[in-house]
């Protein structure tokens, strides 16, 4: 006779495996997939660039191996939850993590914030424009969200262009919204609704 708790455990693992598989998005130039511990070396190498830190709020610099291990493990723990508060994808080209994109602060049935970074050598090639398009589609269709929003520092023109090219609208300016490099900085907020 099979123990009922054992069956439930197996079913949960099966469902989790299926959900993880559905989080893999294959594009012509790159793959979006959940981070793995084997990504730590390429993640630490490619994110550890002052140009990545310049326009983001939460990436430490210098970015060390232990930062990458901690980040990947945090994502793995979050993916096990029935309703994660954030979902992150690695942007992979030639089996190397060259960027990241995710939705954060998820309020199911309503909204989430999108954020991203990309290694310098892969910028201006349409990678992030396409990645944002796919993750917004995922958030609207798979998670049933109604609104995706993003904050950019006012001088982050490249990120603003990515958002505008994906149908986001500039919704306003938040004065002294973030503390960055010891000073309060203004941000623009962008939004897209369905």
Image (spheres, helix red, strand yellow):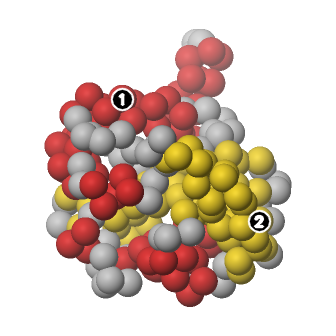
The residue at 24%/49% (across/down) is 48
Q: Nearer the viewer, residue 110 or 80?
A: 110
Q: Nearer the viewer, residue 17 or 141?
A: 141
SS for callout 2 = strand
Is residue 103 shown left or right of residue 123?
right
Indicate the position of residue 128 as horizontal and vertical percent values: 42, 74
Above or below: residue 93 compared with residue 19:
below
Indicate the position of residue 101 as horizontal and vertical percent values: 46, 59
Above or below: residue 77 compared with residue 28:
above
Q: Nearer the viewer, residue 178 or 165?
A: 178
For residue 167, the mark is none
Q: Nearer the viewer, residue 105 or 17?
A: 105
Label 2, residues with CA under 10 Å away: few <14, some 14-19, many ≥20: some
Is the C terminus in the top left, top right, bottom left or bottom right quadrant? bottom right
Could you tell which of marks 2 and 1 lies nearer the N-terminus? 1
Q: Which residue has dot 2 on it?
A: 147
**Contact check, label 2 and label 1, Cβ < 8 Å:** no
The residue at 31%/84% (across/down) is 125
Is the N terminus in the top left, top right, bottom left or bottom right quadrant? top right
SS for callout 1 = helix
Is residue 104 shown left or right of residue 127?
right
Whether residue 28 is visible, yes or no, is: no
Indicate the position of residue 165 as horizontal and vertical percent values: 56, 87
């Amino acid at each position: 006779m099979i123990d009922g708790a054992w069956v439930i455990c197996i079913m949960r693992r099966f469902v989790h495996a299926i959900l993880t598989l559905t989080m893999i998005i294959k594009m012509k130039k790159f793959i979006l997939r959940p981070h793995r511990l084997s990504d730590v070396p390429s993640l630490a190498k490619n994110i550890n660039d002052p140009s990545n830190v310049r326009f983001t709020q939460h990436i430490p610099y210098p970015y060390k191996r232990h930062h990458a291990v901690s980040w990947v493990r945090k994502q793995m723990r979050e993916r096990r939850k029935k309703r994660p508060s954030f979902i992150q994808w690695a942007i992979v080209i030639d089996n190397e993590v060259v960027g990241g994109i995710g939705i954060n602060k998820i309020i199911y049935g309503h909204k989430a914030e999108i954020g991203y970074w990309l290694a310098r050598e892969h910028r201006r090639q349409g990678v992030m424009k396409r990645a944002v398009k796919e993750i917004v589609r995922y958030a609207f269709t798979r998670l049933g969200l109604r609104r995706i929003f993003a904050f950019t520092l006012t001088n982050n023109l490249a990120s603003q262009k990515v958002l505008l090219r994906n149908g986001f609208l500039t919704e306003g300016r938040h004065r002294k919204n973030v503390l960055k490099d010891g000073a309060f900085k203004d941000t623009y907020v962008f939004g897209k609704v369905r």
